[in-house]
Each structure stands twice: as C-alpha cells, then as structure tokens.
Image (spheres, grey):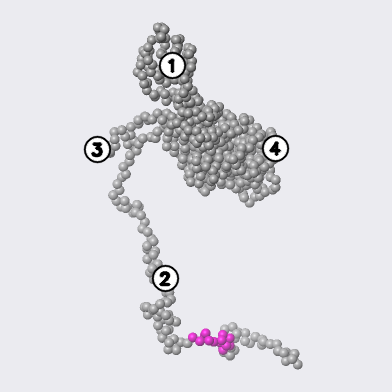
Amino acid sequence: MEDEADIYDGVRAQFPLSFGKQSKSQTSLEAIHNATRRSSSNLSSDPSAATTHTKSTNDLPSISSSSKSWLLSLRNSKIPNPDPTADRGGGSSTMGPPRPPLPVESDEDGGVMVGPPRPPEEKDDDSAMIGPPPPPVGLGSGEEGDDDGEMIGPPRPPPSSNLGASTSEDDSDEDEVGNRFRIPLSNEIVLKGHTKVVSALAVDHSGSRVLSGSYDYTVRMYDFQGMNSRLQSFRQLEPFEGHQVRNLSWSPSGDRFLCVTGSAQAKIYDRDGLTLGEFVKGDMYIRDLKNTKGHISGLTWGEWHPKTKETILTSSEDGSLRIWDVNDFKSQKQVIKPKLARPGRVPVTTCAWDREGKCIAGAIGDGSIQIWSIKPGWGSRPDIYIDKGHSDDITGLKFSGDGRVLLSRSFDGSLKVWDLRKIKEPLKVFEDLPNNYGQTNVAFSPDEQLFFTGTSVERESSSGGLLCFYDCTNLELVSRVGISATCSVVQCAWHPKLNQIFATVGDKGQGGTHILYDPTISERGALVCVARAPRKKSIDDFEAKPVVHNPHALPLFRDQPSRKRQREKILKDPLKSHKPELPITGPGFGGRVGASQGSLLTQYLLKKGGMIKETWMEEDPREAILKYAGVAANDPKFIAPAYAKTQPEPVFQTSDSDEEEK
C-alpha cells in the first residue's frame, strides 16, 4: 500500500495543484455573447448599405430597442463615477448613468434646494426641481436641454436611435424592422463537422436536438443540453453508403426521425440514432407503380405527418408519392400517381403536408404543382392542379397555417406565392434568388408575419449566401441577411420555442449549420451550449501507458511472417517452379549452343555433317502422299483387310469427252 501511495504521489506531483479542480467560469455572459456577436455588415437590411454608412466600434448591431437599452444599461453601469461628491443622500449609490460634476453652491434666491442637485444648465432656473435629475440629454447627438420648467417623475431613458455613434437612415430602418418583426440576428454560432454541403436539417419540437444531413453521406446529431462551447456532435450516422442525405424529419412526439437518402428506401431511427427499420424496395420490372410494394428509384423528399406519429409521406424519382405506416415496413398504405400531360414516368421533386395533415402537395418534374385532399375514397386525381407553376424543377413547398397560401421555390431562381383559391396566377413572384441545390426550401416565421428562403452562391456574384425575409402582408422584401461569403444557403428554419433561426450552408469542400439568435429574445438552444465551458481535465483522465517489455513472448501475440519473399525465392528456383527452359538467343552455355538451328550440340554436329537433312521444305505434299499408294494397295492394314472380300469394286464413270468432241 505504501508503494502505491508513493506512485500516486509521484504522478500527482507532475500536475499543478489546481489541476482537476472544478472552478467556475470567470467569463461573464456579456463577454460570451459578445464573442458570438455578428458583424454589423451581416446585419444590414441591404447588403450594399453595409459599405455606405460607417459605425463606431462602440455601436451595437441591429437589434430591438429594448435590447439596446438593456445593453446600454450594462455598459453604463461599468463606467466609474468621476466625482466622489456625486453620491449624496447618506452615501447611497446612484443607479443608471453617472451624473456630471456639479459646483456646490446655494440657490440664488436663498432658498433650500430640495432633492438631488441639478445638472449644469446654460439658462438660470429659479424653480425648484423635484425628483431625481434627468440623464445627459442627447448622448453624442449635440442636443442641449431646453426645458426651463419643473421635472417630475423618473428620468427619461436614453434615446434608442443613438447609442454613441452617428445616426443614419439605414440604422433607423433596421431599428424599425427589429421593433416590428424582432428577428433574432444579433449573435451567431456554427455547428461544423460535415465535409460537404449540408442538405438536410431537422430540429425536434422541444428544441433540444438538431439533425443535419449532408452530401458527404452522413447524418450528425447535436444535443444542446449535453453540448459545450466546442459545439461537437454526439453521434454520426451513415444511413446508406454512397447516397446523399435528402431530408430529415422528426415525428410529432419527437421519439423517432425519418431519414430520406438518394436510395429507394427510407429509414426510421430512434431519438438516439439506433435503426428501427427500413422500408421495402419495389420490383423495378413491374410497370404499374401501384402494384409495387415500394419505390423503385431514388427518393427526393419525405416528411412525417404533423399530427399522426405512425404516418409518413415520401416522393421519388420513379414518379410516385407514397404514404407509409411506420409499423409496417413491408408495404405502403397508399400510392399516389400524379396527373401527367403524356404517359410516362416524371419524377416528383418534393412534397409537403399542410399543418393539419389533411392535404398533400407534390411538385412534379414538368413544373406543375398538384394538391390532394385526404378524404374518404380519395385517389390519385388531384383536387388542385397548377400547370406550369415554374419553368424548372421545384425544390421546396410550404403551406401556410390556414392552408390557403402555398409557397414554392424552384431552380429557376424564383419564389412564388400562391393563393389556392385563385390558382391561375401567383399572388407574387420574387426573382433574383439563385438556387443550385435540389433541397433549397422556404419557411415561415412562428407568427407567420414573415417567410424566408436561402440563396446559392454564383460564380460571377459577390453577395454570397443570403437569407431573404419577406413580409406576408405586403409581400415585399424586408431584409437580406448575409450568412456566408463563399457558401450557399440550402435549408432554413425558425424554431418557435427557441426563437432561433437555423440555416445550413456549404459547398464542395465544407458544410455547417448556422444558428442565429438574440440573447434578449431567444430561449435555451444556443444560449445553453455557448455559456457552458468544456470540462477541465481531471487527474482521473490521466492514464499512464504500460510498458511492454516482451511483446512477442507468446505465439498467440506474434505476428505472422510475410510470405512474399518466400514466394519470390521459389519463383526464381527453376526446379521448384517447374519452369520450362527458354530458347537461347545469345551465346550458348552449359552444353547448349546459342545461335544454332538446334538446341543440342549433337543435333548441331549432325546437321553440319550432312547426316540430318531437312527436305520437307522442298517436297511436294501430294507426291509425298502418293508415294505410299502402291504399298497401301499391296499390303492393306487395319480396317481395309476386313472388308476386302465383301467390298464391291468401285465403278467409275467413263469420261465421254471424246464422244462429245466427235
């Protein structure tokens, strides 16, 4: 026991005394959120306006007025009081911004001053002031106090339009947008780990777990409650080898999720990433898709039913939509064949449920949008058919909460707003939204005052990947938020409980998930993991590697010798390899003559002496055979003697050439 104690003390002596002790983080929340604060150029409502107006280093990004006042109070509370005589009234400390130094003097009228002293004023005021003094007017704006009357009540809060920097019209516009819609854009974190563009995103309904799927064939799982500031995933899955992840969707209860890849089979996983089942693949040799038990081509999209936790919807390149029961992986419940202008197989690029799960929307490869209402006896005939909704493939569909408005996003670089009661023309078409990925979607804000989508990066463009926000009421652009300078924005979502915006980005060499939040209006989610420091190493984590003195003592642990050299040695041995002798082209050796017509010395000498003659090259083959004709007739052998007595004599036709000549 003493030896073990000495060893432990020796190991412990290699570390400082503070090693392994759990000490509280000394970093304040304000410093943590300042580290994740987005730059002002990314927060501008107009990307071009970010370079036209300048902001000081002390200015705050575009956030709501309440957020600015809160941060201003935190900032001013740390400013030391320059005048020790400013604290009056029994030594009580003042709250809010510090008062300027005042000359100690009596009232001009000889009266007694009631309350705290007044700040210095340019005009004389003979009236007495009641209540605490007002703060300095116009922080940095150059305004002077012009009120000569009595001040009653608490001091006015600092103006929200000026926080120690020059004002501009762009700032006022951003404040107006922040006050009206309260978009959480002040801070940002990035969930990394993928090596290619992140094409799928799913956040569970409680907001505790995030799923991200990528073109690198993997799915990563993040847990906000168990994740620290390193922002690492706790599990990585590869649903189908060699197939891109197209979409991810949580069940309504949040205990399972659906994974849709480029293969023909969708998979169901539990909350911890364990495989629960895989849907069957159909027979590709059956022409009628209604008679197949599953999809026969790669999947394009899939979503869980918003209300029923046993039903999911998938779409495929084989030209069909299928409704599945997660308790039966062997066959689907319903097959939907879209309406086509001409017979054939046109892929279904995407699909969507409405909020109540009573309607299904599908985007067809010919540019049409078809909607089916789930009712008794319904079939493949669509209830709403929008012909030529887009000129290119549609990548995203989204119903509004009341089910009357449908948003569609397409490869043609447009976003269209459809009123399902008037389907002849869209309500609004937003152009100049480049889209290079088949999973680019469109989403609503939690209160449905806004809808937004992402843009892709083009070669000749310098704007980068953006999130474009639009007003649902006026159908106009509200804000364009820069997410990445080099990567495209694919999928986006605004979680209603966390009040945080998720956006997936990436290109051919990298991928990640950006989370935008505001510490004043967002809850949990990114706020939990950013403030959690990584666990410090403890002495229990230290493990001394054992020294192995004789690793090959037993044959069990001995490495097998390589047989490569042994095989090469055998190939070089002519006896063991049974290698035939090669003809000699050069000088002879070992009794063999090199450049000779024969291979042996005896043959060479006989040929040179004339005893061996090769005449077959000069003989006529016909004469050589007829040479033995007389011998064969006089002394027949083998089969001919057996039939000699019974064999009839051959009768040949006499030539009548002489008669013809006569």
Query: Which residue bears the numbered disc 1?
Result: 121
Q: Quadrant of residue 601?
A: bottom left
- Residue 450 seen in this snapshot: yes
Q: At label 4, which amino acid type do we have?
A: Lys
Residue type, numbered disc 1: Glu
Mark 1 element type: loop
* Residue at 65 percent of width and 48 percent of height: 345
Alpha carbon distance from label 1 to label 2: 116 Å
Q: Amino acid at mark 2?
A: His
Location of residue 544 by image quarter: top left
Q: Position of residue 320 (x, y in %)?
A: 64, 44
Residue 216 seen anywhere in this rendered image of the structure: no
Determine the secondary structure under disc 3: helix
The first of marks 3 and 4 along the sequence is: 3
Q: Please identify the quadrant where the N terminus is shown.
A: top left
Q: Residue furthest bottom?
A: 662
Q: Which element carries disc 4, helix, strand or loop? A: loop
Q: Nearer the viewer, residue 270 or 607?
A: 607
- Whether residue 34 is situated above or below residue 661 in the rendered picture: above
- Would you name the residue on which mark 3 appears? 6
In the foreground, 165 or 440:
165
Image: magenta residue range? 614-627
- Report the residue at 61% width, 31% height from top: 472
* Residue at image mark 4: 424
Mark 4 Cα shell of 10 Å, populated few (<14), some (14-19), many (≥20): few
Q: Is residue 99 above or below residue 262?
A: above
Residue ID for mark 2: 578
